[in-house]
Amino acid sequence: MSITTPISQENIVVGEVANGLPLTIPVYRLKGDGSGPSVYIQANMHGAEVQGNAVIFQLLEQLKQLNLKGDITLVPYANPIGCNQKSGEFTLGRFDPITGTNWNRMYHYNSDLVTQFAKDHSHYDDAALKNHFKQALVDEIDTKLNGPAYLLNTGKRIALNLQKLAHQADIVLDLHTGPISSKHLYCPTYATDSARYFNIEHVLLIPSDFDGAMDEASFCPWWHLSDALSAQDRDFNVQVEAFTVELGSQEKIDLQEALNDANSILSYLNHKNVLVDAAHQPKQMTRYACHLDDYFAYYAPIGGMVEYVAPLGGHIKAGEPIAHVLRMERYLSEQPLQTLSLDCDAVAILHFASASVNQGTELYKFFTNVFEL
């Protein structure tokens, strides 16, 4: 099959390691004809969350055979330190080993920039407003990257380099996985309709709060700009859509499932007019949603060895078992096998990766107050 769209590669430098050599990240680009929105997709910000790299592979395999309206930038191995952060046979890489900070909580957002921009540029038309604000966001990241090197720790430098790429796009997808997890989508509430174009059954609707993640760093400035202009009686729609796409469980590559996930993303991109292609359409399926305030973490009430019973993605009724906890040191003194349950209906989304659990460990995460999307 002939290649329609060429792929270029650049290795960007995001820091230096201890021997002075550059720390690099591969960046793949495909050019569209300029008539559609631009797209940024990254994977593997957390070290063990490797499935996104397989999805990017499957996306590239298909995108090079398509005509594109929008430019697409894809970044596998977004965190080269995290994906090499091993302990025995396991990959750690969720937290910076030096600072202890979550790698996906180091992105930048300056609300004062939004406030000032809304005051100074409200007279611009929509197209000019979008272009100037996008450039203002990129310029602020450049200022930080080009400032005194001693002000940036390793994780912040990586995050800012990635964020600079993301700020140049109209659509941002950050590919993640959970420990042991079902597929789900983090979706800003203003983009709820777009969630119906991913082949993902469970959708977590999130507000405009910024907590340091890539999706929030991408949509919060535009959402808050829209709100600030609305306060001036100016109607300006949010111009950027950004999602965290949770692809399943960590420490696992599944190329067939990656192809399914790539088709899911292409369905969404087709809906957003990125592709010159009508073949990719969303599957007919019931999609369930809950709001972030109803996303419930269940912490282990006792320590022990856990059999996880609640099926991931399964709808659980109040009182049904979600786990059995085995405590063999208590075999002669009390019932060694305890059953855990919830007091409300819920959907199990993910659970802890290990069967060995201390009291207070985050055992499960559940959707509650679920509704059909």
Image (tube, rainbow, N blue to C red):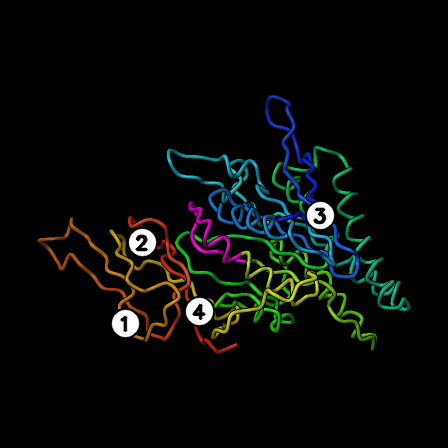
Disc sitting over residue 359 in the figure: 2
Residue that protrudes farthest toward the right in the picture: 123
Q: Position of residue 212 (x, y in %)?
A: 61, 53
Q: Is residue 160 left or right of residue 308?
A: right
282 in magenta: no
Q: Nearer the viewer, mark 2 or mark 3?
A: 3
Q: Is residue 282 left or right of residue 27?
A: left
Q: Is residue 195 left or right of residue 49?
A: right
What segment carries the magenta color?
A: 245-261
Three-letter code, disc 4: Phe
Q: Position of residue 23 (x, y in %)?
A: 63, 31
| Total marks in image | 4
The reply to whether the C-beta atoms of the residues labelled 4 and 3 are less than 8 Å apart is no
Disc sitting over residue 367 in the figure: 4
- First reached walking from the N terminus: tag 1 or tag 4: 1
- First reached walking from the N terminus: tag 1 or tag 2: 1
Disc sitting over residue 165 in the figure: 3
Q: Please tell me which residue is depicted at 79% across the width and 43% down the height of the picture.
A: 143
Q: Provide the secondary structure element on which disc 2 rests.
A: loop
- Calculate the distance from the C-alpha at mark 1 to the C-alpha at mark 3: 46 Å
- First reached walking from the N terminus: tag 1 or tag 3: 3
